[in-house]
Image (cartoon, rainbow, N blue to C red):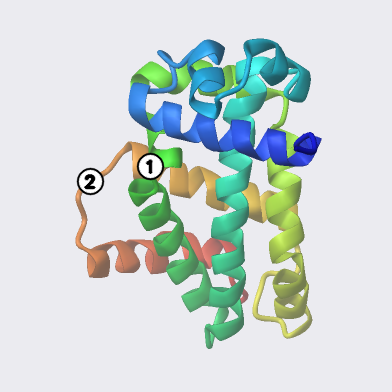
Amino acid sequence: MPPVSTDATRERIIDAAEACFARFGVAKTTVEDIAAAAKLSRATVYRAVSGGRDELILAVVVRDLHRFLDRLAVRLRSERSVPEAIVEGTMDAVEYVRNEPAIAHFLVPEAAGHMQAAVAGAAEHVLALCCDYVRPYFEQAQRQRTLRPDIEVEGTVEFLFRIITSLIVMDRRREPDELRRFLRTYVVPGIAGP
């Protein structure tokens, strides 16, 4: 039987890490757990993922982020207006994170320190990835003067990340229509053009 490719091995390890984080929680998952779930030796895991657990935490998050951003791109193409794209994109992001086990597990208090350590050095990478996805829509909206001309995509994406995170962490149990009103009143005016 031919050897498994490095990419295939890495994906197998990331799949195993995602399953272990969901089963045991981020704080309690060890590289040994991940190796056992992947049916690989610990040495093989470390060869494929030199950054260890922190790299695996980030890999799981980034893979899920790609899935969400693919959905968001479809949403942005279908929205009729920038304000509605902001509102519905934010609603989608909050819903996605709350219902996606791989991401939701990173928001529990016991995971906070582990997540922070893993993502701190890669925050710029994550932000750049999100900006790359939304940049074409952002630039088009600025050309059409439906976004404020004095804002940049990086700052806008960071602002929306902060809003989404606060809506998840400080869940006030608003009904969807109530949350939409909140976003239209307080968030949209900071981004959309007059």
Amino acid found under the numbered disc labelled 2: Arg
Any part of residue 92 in sight:
yes
Residue 152, visible in the rendered structure: no
Q: Is residue 112 left or right of residue 178?
A: right
Q: Quadrant of residue 51?
A: top right
Classed neighbour count for the residue bearing mark 1: other residues with Cα under 10 Å, few (<14), some (14–19), many (≥20) = some
Across and down, in percent, residue 44 comes to 71, 18
The residue type indicated by label 1 comes to Pro
Please name the residue that numbered disc 1 is placed on: 101
The residue indicated by pointer 2 is 172
Q: Residue at x 31, y 68 (%)?
A: 181
Vertical order, 150 against 47 (above or below) = below
Taking depth in this image into account, of 129 and 167 the one nearest to the observer is 129
Q: Check disc 1 and report its element: helix, strand or loop.
A: helix
Does residue 23 appear left or right of residue 176 in this picture?
right
Q: Earlier in the sequence, mark 2 or mark 1?
A: 1
